[in-house]
Amino acid sequence: MLEFLRYFIYGWIILIAAIPVNLIAKKIGLVTWYDFLVFKKSIGFLDGIFMLIVYPLIFGAIIYFLDTLDSSL
């Protein structure tokens, strides 16, 4: 049960972190997953790099940091 709660909290942290990441991406003119899936926009090279590499790396780093922090406590 504690494992479930831990990942539930991680999910909320990712959700909270996704908001500013999406706002920043939108501000600099990159297509986000929402734009791509809902509006079926064609994506440019930088948009693809952001959606397929940078975006997952940001959230993976958050989980890695939280997992490292959790194991050190």
Image (cartoon, rainbow, N blue to C red):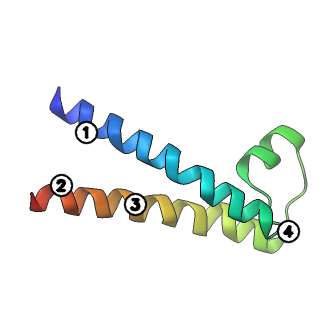
Mark number, residue 6: 1
Q: Is residue 31 above or below residue 8?
A: below
Q: Is residue 1 above or below residue 18?
A: above
- Outermost residue, left direction? 73
Residue at 34% from the left image edge and 34% from the top image edge: 8
Q: Report if the CB atoms under discs 1 and 2 are less than 8 Å apart.
A: yes
> Mark 1 is on which residue type?
Arg
Q: For mark 3, does the 10 Å Cα neighbourhood hold few (<14), some (14 to 19), or many (20 or more) residues?
A: some
Residue placed under numbered mark 3 in the picture: 62
Local secondary structure at mark 2: helix
Mark number, residue 70: 2
* Closer to the camera in the image, 64 or 26: 26
Q: Report if the CB atoms under discs 1 and 3 are less than 8 Å apart.
A: no
Considering the image in quadrants, where does the N terminus appear?
top left
Considering the image in quadrants, where does the C terminus appear?
bottom left
The CA span between labels 1 and 2 is: 9 Å
Mark number, residue 44: 4
Q: Report if the CB atoms under discs 3 and 2 are less than 8 Å apart.
A: no
The CA span between labels 1 and 4 is: 37 Å
Mark number, residue 52: none
Pair 4/2: label in front: 2
Residue at 20% from the left image edge and 61% from the top image edge: 69
* Closer to the camera in the image, 62 or 19: 19
> Mark 3 is on which residue type?
Ile
> Mark 2 is on which residue type?
Asp
